[in-house]
Image (tube, rainbow, N blue to C red):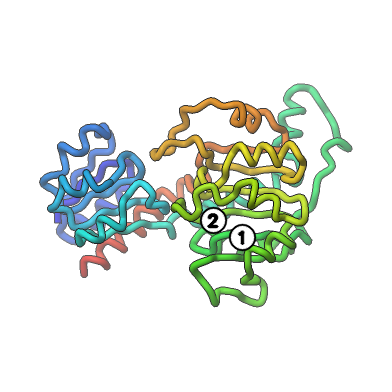
Amino acid sequence: MRFLIIDRVHPILMEHLQIAGHHCDYLPEIDAKEVMQNTKNYDAIILRSKVRIDKKFIDQNPQLRLIARVGSGMENIDVKYAQSRGILCLNSPEGNRDSVAEHVIGLLISLLHNINKSNLEVRQGIWQREENRGQELMGKIVGIIGYGNTGSATAKRLLAFGVTVLAYDKYKSGFGTQNIIETTLDKIFEHADIVSFHVPLTNETRYMADKHFFKHFRKNFYLINTSRGQVVKTSDLVKYLKKGKILGAGLDVLEYESYNFSLNAQSEDLNYLRTATNVIITPHIAGVTQQSFYKLSEVMARKILNAIGE
C-alpha cells in the first residue's frame, strides 16, 4: 500500500510500515490546502488534526482504503461516511491515555492545594499561607464520565489517593470492580465532589456540561475537562464558577479551539477563565508527552498492520 503521512509522527510508524513492504511519503510540513492535490496516488492517509476528512474529501479520493488518525478523537473525520464507502478508519487512543491520566491528577492536585494560585502570588512577592489552605484529595468522591482509554486509566490512578471512584459510560457496562463503582449520572450528581470528562466529541456530548447539567449536582464540586472543549459550554461554566457551585476548574481544552486545536478567539468568558484564580488552563497538552509521541505512532503501526492482515 502507498501511505501519505501529513502530520508529524514518530519515525517508528514509518519504520514498521516500510519493513512490511509499504511505501510511505512523509510530508508533515504540507499545507492543509495542498493536501487534496497530493492524495490521488495513495491508498491510505495518516494524519492528526491538520485537515478535515469530510464527504467532499472522500468523494474526491475514491481510491482511499484506509484513514488513520494518530491520536484519540475522530471528530475531524466523517467516519460514518468513510465506512459506508468501504474505507477502514483507525485511531490510537491507547497511546496517550497514560499521559492524559497523569495530567488529570496534576490539575486536581494543583486545584485542591492551590499550587498554581500560590505560585503566582509568590512570584509577585505575596506570601500567604492561611489564605491558601487547601483540600486533600483523599476521601473525595470522583465521578468519571466516559470509561474508555483515558477514563479507565485516570480511575486507576485515582485509587492510589484513597478516593471513591464512580464511573459512568452510556455505551459500556460490566466494567465495575471492587474499587471502581459502575454507576449512573444521577448517582454522580448526588455524590460527586469532583467530575472529570473523558468522552469523545459527538452530537450527544457537545455541550453536555451546561447549566442543566451543573444544576443537578447536590454538592459544590470541581470540574476537570481533558476531553474536548465543546463538551463544556463555557458561558454556563463561568456562570456556575461565579455562583460558587463549581469550586474550581482544570481545563486542558476550550470550547473556542478550532478543529486543529489552535486557539484564535476572544470573549468575556474566556477572559474570565484566564484571570480566575480557581481555574487552571493548559493548551491541550494532556496527551502530549515525549513518551506518548512514540506510543501513539507505535500503536497506530500495529493497528494498521493487523487490520490489513500483516
Q: Are marks 1 and 2 in contact (CB under 8 Å)?
A: yes
Residue at image position (15%, 48%) is: 61
Residue 26 location (% of width, % of height): 23, 42
Q: Secondary structure at mark 1?
A: strand
Nearer to us in this view, 276 or 45? 276
Report the quarter where the C terminus lies. Answer: bottom left
Question: Which badge, 1 or 2, comes first in the chain's sequence?
Answer: 1
Give me the disc on residue 198: 2
Mark 2 neighbour class, 10 Å CA radius: few under 14, some 14 to 19, many 20 or more = many
- Checking the image for residue 31, the label placed there is none
Q: Residue at x 50, y 70 (%)?
A: 172
Check disc 1: other Cα within 10 Å, few if <14, some if 14-19, many if 20+: many
65 shown above or below 281: below
Extreme residue in the left direction: 41
Residue 19 shows in the view = no
Circle count:
2
Residue 50 lies, in percent from the top left, at 32, 39
Direction from residue 108 to residue 230 in the image, left or right: left
User: Residue beneath label 1, please?
Assistant: 144
In the figure, 159 relative to 117: above or below?
below
Query: Is 221 on the left-hand or right-hand side of 102?
Result: right
